Amino acid sequence: MADVPVARRKADTLYFQLAGEIAHAIATGVLQAGEKLPSIRKLSSQRQVSLSTVMEAYRELEDCALIEVRPQSGFYVRHKPSVLFVPELTQPPQSPSDVVIDPMYLPATLARLHDIKVDFGFAILAPALFPNQQLQRLLAQVTRQDPDLIADYGRPTGDVELRRQIARRSLNWGGQFEADEILITQGAIEALNLCLRAVTQPGDVVVIESPSYFGLLQILESFQLKALEIPTHPQTGISIEALEFATRNGEVRACVLLPNFSNPLGSLMPDENKKRLVELLAERHIPLIEDDLYGEFYYKGERPRPAKAFDKEGNVMLISSFTKTVAPGFRIGWVVAGKYHQKIEQLKFINTFSNAMPLQRTIARFLESGGYDHHLRRLRRACHEQVGHAVAAIERSFPADTRLHVPQGGYVFWVELNAVVDTLLLLRQALKEGISFTPGPLFSPSHSYGHCLRICCNAAWSDLHEQAIVRLGELIRQQMASTTTH
Ligand SMILES: Cc1ncc(COP(=O)(O)O)c(C=O)c1O
């Protein structure tokens, strides 16, 4: 039998996962400096794990200097100054600009051109995190029960069984729409394309968050749309005041936002802001395209509501997808387009006509079976742990003036470095050592954020990840030292 790499074995252990959860709780402030941790016996019974698992987890956290043992007393979160200052509201240019994206720095290009050993770039979770075998069985079952599905061209709106399941699930956050209001797409990316095409013409101005997902920027570029970047806070999302000001003169044709766990900031817009946002845009007749791809990735509490929950006029086009949650390879997304539904249906007909019926039906059965909820719980836990490890590693290894917002969901986060650091240069250096991430300028049409980067925690944490963060910290320090000596 081939040797399993040591790094993989450690990441898979229960104690390491438990340590990751506690590290994240410390990084997010859920556990505060000086706070006492549960005793080994108590945690072992709370978590239904062995005493030695808890002891190992606490030892790991001690090694990382996150907790300390006080004789005769127990384990405590260490008192140490956090390096994790939260970045401030972004300050993008105030006028619209053309969009030109350099494909050289896209994660897909980097993966093609370089031998990447540790990937913090791709926002696609590792295959081991998906229910592949369950889906394989369901796919065989649905095509056995109904072989004609293979010969079925489908309809532009998509499989009604899947749409019914999506409608049913949206009740969880107060969504009240019927299967007929939903249209299935080839991932969220097709939905974004269709929505933008439905409401804009080349040359129009579209409001976006700053920074914004580069895939969206590429669509704007291909449709020759201008982007108006709005100041965005890493915790609460786009500034409603700035949006109000930017949309006052009727120039803006559409608005594309990710209120829940945005990519790349990881921000989560409070409900009251979502409500104001929806009311403001409805008043000004500006359609809102809401990308809710990461809404299911919350770590705690309830699923955050999409802005669509506040939409009374049908002005919000809500987009989501099963590509991040269930099956990247099935390429199934969806949109509830409100008053733009008919237009989107026509465009879907022209664009790709329909999605593969057997794949849609398989997802429908997966949702129906309850397997989806069970899987999501596991996925959220895994993402939470991965992010916790990455944040804790950055806290240990990056310079003290690093700013970082720890998200409450999702698996990407934004890191702001000292202003002298050039993350494009950092990336070129890191790639030579097999480490990849996504540099800040890729997320902005004005190519701002040269000192920022996005970290994507797409796989189980390992020693290799840990070493890669340490190495990035060293490269950052070297750049800072060389700029002060010049
Ligand atoms: C914010 C955002 N929107 C849309 C997409 C595209 O999603 P899909 O793979 O479902 O087409 C991505 C993919 O990374 C994304 O991060």
Image: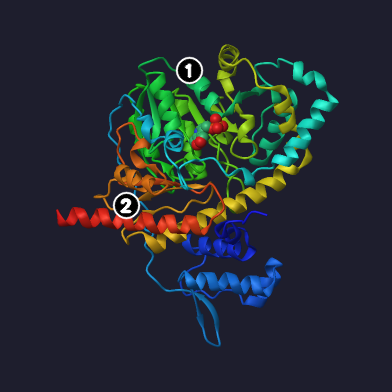
Q: Which mark is first along the chain, 2 or 1?
A: 1
Name the element at disc 2: loop
Residue 149 horizontal side relative to residue 228, left or right? right
> Along the horizontal axis of the image, is 44 left or right of 347?
right
How packed is label 1: few (under 14 Cα within 10 Å), some, or many (20 or more)?
Answer: some
Q: Where is residue 60 in the image (x, y as percent from the top left)?
A: 53, 70
Give me the C-alpha separation between circle 1 and circle 2: 37 Å
Q: Is the N terminus in the top left, top right, bottom left or bottom right quadrant?
A: bottom right
The image's colour scheme reads rainbow
**In terms of image quadrants, where is residue 306?**
top right
x, y (%) of residue 383?
Answer: 57, 50
Say which residue label 1 marks.
Answer: 197
Q: Mark 2 points at which residue?
A: 417
Q: Residue furthest front?
A: 1
Residue occupying image coordinates x 38% and y 38%: 211
Q: Looking at the picture, which amino acid does disc 2 mark?
A: Leu
Can residue 174 be seen here? The reply is yes
